[in-house]
Amino acid sequence: MLISDPFIYQFILLFGAFVAGIVQGATGFGSGLVLNAFWLHILEPSIAIPLNIISCLFISGLPIYKLRKSLDFSKLKSFIFLGVIGIPIGMLLLTITKPSSFKVAIGFLLIIYSIWMITSRGFSIKVNKNRLIDQLIGLISGIMGGFAALGGLLPTIWVSLQKLPKNSQRGTYEPFIFITSIASIISFYFAGLITLSILVDFIKVFPALILGSWIGIRIYPKINEELFRKVILGLIFVAGLILLV
């Protein structure tokens, strides 16, 4: 059952945006995960996901701009074409999925993701120059983006498993999130899923998103990387548990 109390609604809406901004600014990913964990308690998926994607567009754009001179974007093109194609497929799945099933599925996904990232720390994958796997991951990620605003999840895991340099990792998955968010918004608009109420809620959360993102960007170079990694994964794990309650 969704929370409808006006005060609690506004608190969850704004606090979720603020936390997601911090996570995105500091790590380059995770905003969609955090926003789902908060907003699916107050909004139906058909409303929460478009609002989530619009928010992800803005809070991924700011860090990309601020860090543009240090990031390596060379691997991005392998993922992006099929990623954009996957967006409408994911959007179709969103419109035919039961809200309760969706919420539970996302909760399990967050838990599995956080456990995977913690336990696979010493595991790496070496790949050759064949871009087929990258393209397949791009397609699946596009579907996940249109379906659950989680388009950056698989690229993040994939480049992390390859033990690429930090700037190469962030230069791949964060622009992927940004570009597929644009494609998702266009798809949602033509499908009639971008409503006035969504735009009103976005205007409300915009200051919290930007403030959180700015704080995250400031934290990024100063905090111990391993400690912050564990904190973020712990937050994602708790978010998954909350969705299963």
Image (tube, helix red, strand yellow):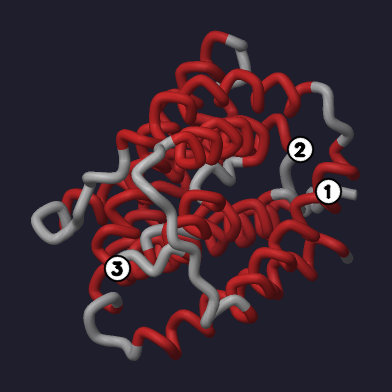
Q: Quadrant of residue 212?
A: bottom left
Earlier along the polypeptide chain: callout 2 or callout 3? 2
Q: Amino acid at mark 1?
A: Leu
Q: x%, y% of residue 35?
A: 59, 54
Earlier along the polypeptide chain: callout 3 or callout 1? 1
Q: x%, y% of residue 61?
A: 29, 45
Residue 18 visible to an observer of this rendering = no
Residue 23 visible to an observer of this rendering = yes
Disc number at residue 166?
3
Q: State whether residue 127 is above or below residue 89.
A: below
Q: CA distance from mark 2 to mark 3?
A: 36 Å
Residue at x-position 20% and y-position 53%: 72
Residue at x-position 43% and y-position 54%: 127
Q: State whether residue 94 is above or below residue 124.
A: above
Q: x%, y% of residue 68?
A: 14, 52
Q: Are marks 2 and 1 in contact (CB under 8 Å)?
A: yes
Q: Amino acid at mark 3?
A: Lys
Helix, strand or loop status at disc 1? loop
Observer-side mark, 2 or 3, equals 3
Helix, strand or loop status at disc 3? helix
Q: Quadrant of residue 180?
A: top left
Q: Is residue 59 left or right of residue 116?
A: left
Q: Nearer the viewer, residue 109 or 138?
A: 138
**What residue is disc 2 on?**
44
**What residue is disc 1 on?**
2
> Callout 3 environment at 10 Å: few (<14), some (14 to 19), or many (20+)?
few
Q: Is residue 114 left or right of residue 76?
A: right
Q: Are marks 3 and 1 in contact (CB under 8 Å)?
A: no
Q: Amino acid at mark 2?
A: Glu
In the image, farthest residue toward the front: 128
